[in-house]
């Protein structure tokens, strides 16, 4: 989410919770995102707090039962693909654009 989308949501009083992943950390978010309640995707306490906030915001009476360790493990697989494999694929594509004979 970029700052424009977050700002538009904030102005309309729509709760925004940045979820930091793939190397981005909540402690390093730029202003104004740093002013929002954010979470690190690999932090169980952050995730539990996010689900608690979502439960309260939605007016639910019970929080969902979440297997945080599985969620974090699934996130780590996603982050590996998103950062590592995606970069490899993009780099190979750029090389092929520069030298089509390598295709």
Image (cartoon, rainbow, N blue to C red):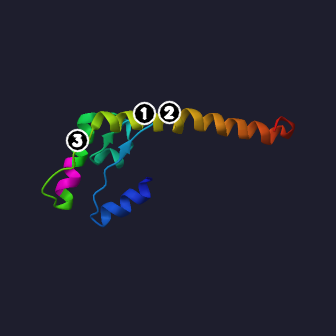
- Is the magenta region chiefly helix, strand or loop? helix
Q: Position of residue 2 (x, y in %)?
A: 45, 53
Q: Is residue 14 visible?
A: yes
Pointer 1 and pointer 2: residues touching (CB < 8 Å)?
yes
Q: For the C terminus, which image quadrant?
A: top right
Residue where numbered disc 1 is placed = 76
Judged from this view, the residue extending furthest toward the right is 101
Q: Which residues are magenta?
A: 52-56
Residue 48's disc is 3
Query: Is 9 a magenta residue?
Result: no
Q: Secondary structure at mark 3?
A: helix
Give neighbour class at mark 2: few <14, some 14-19, many 20+ (Cα, 10 Å).
few
Q: Is residue 49 above or below residue 23?
A: below
Residue 20's disc is none
Residue where numbered disc 2 is placed = 80
Q: Residue at x 31, y 64 (%)?
A: 11
Q: Secondary structure at mark 1?
A: helix
What's the CA distance linking mark 3 and mark 1?
17 Å
Q: Position of residue 15 (x, y in %)?
A: 27, 58
In this view, the residue in front, 66 or 6, is: 66
Q: Where, by quadrant of the figure, is residue 40 drawn?
A: top left
What's the CA distance linking mark 1 and mark 2?
6 Å
């Amino acid at each position: 989410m970029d700052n424009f989308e977050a700002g538009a949501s904030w102005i309309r009083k729509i709760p925004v919770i940045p979820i930091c992943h793939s190397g981005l950390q909540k402690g390093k978010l730029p202003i104004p995102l740093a002013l929002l309640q954010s979470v690190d995707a690999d932090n169980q306490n952050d995730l539990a707090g996010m689900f608690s906030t979502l439960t309260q915001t939605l007016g639910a009476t019970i929080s969902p039962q979440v297997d945080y360790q599985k969620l974090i493990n699934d996130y780590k697989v996603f982050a590996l693909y998103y950062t590592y494999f995606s970069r490899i694929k993009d780099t190979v594509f750029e090389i092929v654009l520069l030298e089509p004979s390598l295709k």
